[in-house]
Amino acid sequence: MMGKYAAAIPADLYYSRNHFWCRVVAGKNRFGFSSYAIKLMQDVYFLDWQVNAGDKVALLEQIGHIETSKAVSDLFAPLEGTLLYFNPEVLADPSAINVDGYDKGWLFEMDGIIDSLMDATSYHVFLEENWEKAQRMLKGKINAGDD
Amino acid sequence: MSQKKLTVVLSQAQGKDPNRRAIEEEIAAALLMESGIDLGIVPALYDLHEGHTGRLYLEGVQGDMVVISWLYPRAAYWLLDRDGIQGKLGETNIKPAGNNDDEDEEEGEETKRPKGIGSVKVQDRFIFCLDLRDAKDHRTYVEEIRRILSECKQRWDAATADLKPAIVQLGMNISPPASNGTLALNGNSANGVPFLKEEMLKIPGRRWYPVIDYSRCTNCMECLDFCLFGVYGVDSLERIYVDNQDSCKKGCPACSRVCPEQAIMFPDYKSPAIAGAPVGAISGLKIDLTKLFGGGDALVIAAKERDKELLRDGRDAVGLSVGIPKRQSDKKDSPKDDLDNLMDSLDTLEI
């Protein structure tokens, strides 16, 4: 299984293949990082969005960038649709992402059809299936420094 | 020729962000009060075209220089290098926020890999580049400039001690210093700003072009093969260089994705790695999770970006058929699967 400590995945949410959770709040799809993503990244230092509220984005179009204590990554849209709103609080202080990732640490809201998202069970299966690949990637990264 | 003063060039932000202007003004005001400092203010460095008074001023600066800009230090340093404003890169103590103490060790390891082709005809002086995004308080910069000044003074004093007898014996004033390749336009740039302020600060149009970091560039020419807009060229020493800067397509960073050494920067690009973020801070020992978070293959993205520009020019899209390097060949122990391109990006980590 995935490491020593399992990442808890709330059952009432939907999940994207790129590790966002999704909760429908007042008719809008609200997204945040899954605990799996947060475990990989650890403390978020810096979060930057590269699109504006109101912009239409394609599935997996780059929307932002993140730097954490352990990682850097570009961030990509989990859906095709319109980005409606970014959580200003995590922009001002990203620590909420680590402290309360499934609630106050939400990232953005967008409209769009969420049929493509997985439920918690499927996401769990997806994580397990891809764990080996992810591990290889992580180890590859780390070993690359030892060449 | 003993340098008496340290030139500090402040490169303004593009646009009119009042917060940015405010810190610029605070720094400028503080530096005007400092002794031993010559201050020059120019518009955004990246936009200074050939012949702009601000650039002429920079070209005329003799001796050690501090450049304060809204660019990553690497980007600023190599941008100046391309324009013939060269020197050795000075070490600064201002580090990006969020860098911990252990960062130093990582950077130390990073400097052990001098694999790039380096710069040529580097003048014997130091250029210190400070990034205005690294600290919010103008005093941080003023203090660092004081520190740099005292570091430089020690060097100047040591140099004059060596030179003195020769100068005395020659008994002449070697004022436009010969050791410096640039023929000073004025020779008096050390005595104050020699150009009209309005001319210096004239806002140039926005520009967009790649900047090569020759400490990383291995002269592999992949960028030359990839770019179909004639931006890159080869100089008389058969080194790759950014030949036609203004042929570059605004907003397109594709060649920097193709570069196997991440030596190509677009200082105005939104993602830090492409804009020239410090090696230690971004790619140092941090894991790049882009692929895991849904990012595509860098080469595919680059080809798409290039196609967009080709179509905009009324040309045909070429996809991955032209100028796409075959990376697998120069990589030894990596598994041959869909992670290969991601693995390739690890090359930045090689020591």
Image (cartoon, helix red, strand yellow):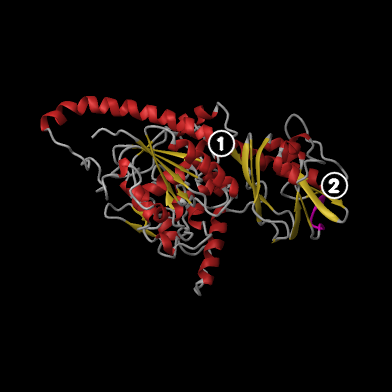
Counting from the top left corner in percent of width and height, residue A42 is at: 69, 34
Is residue B213 among the parts visible in the rendering?
no
Which of the chains bears the disc numbered 2? Answer: A
Which of the chains bears the disc numbered 1? Answer: B
Q: Residues within 10 Å of mark 2 (few under 14, many from 20)?
A: some
Residue holding disc 2:
A13
Which residue is situated farthest in the bottom direction here? B314
Q: Residues within 10 Å of mark 1 (few under 14, many from 20)?
A: some
Q: Are marks 1 and 2 on the same chain?
A: no
Q: Is residue A9 left or right of residue B286?
A: right
Mark 1 to mark 2: distance in Å?
A: 40 Å
Work out which quarter of the rendered image holds the C terminus of chain B and state it.
top left
Counting from the top left corner in percent of width and height, residue B146 is at: 43, 30
Q: Is residue A54 left or right of residue B3?
A: right
Residue at figure coordinates x 38%, y 48% from the top left? B80
Residue holding disc 1:
B135
In which quadrant of the rendered view does residue A34 lie? top right
* Number of marks drawn: 2
Amino acid of disc 1: Ala
In which quadrant of the rendered view does residue B228 lie? bottom left
Q: Is residue B127 left or right of residue A56?
A: left
Query: Vertical placement of B158 versus A60: above or below?
Result: above
Amino acid of disc 2: Leu
Counting from the top left corner in percent of width and height, residue B210 is at: 45, 54
Q: Is residue B97 magenta?
A: no
Contact, CB < 8 Å: mark 1 with mark 2? no
Which residue is situated farthest in the front direction here? B33
User: Which numbered disc covers residue B244?
Assistant: none
Counting from the top left corner in percent of width and height, residue B299 is at: 54, 55
Work out which quarter of the rendered image holds the N terminus of chain B and state it.
top left
Q: Which residues are magenta?
A: A114-119
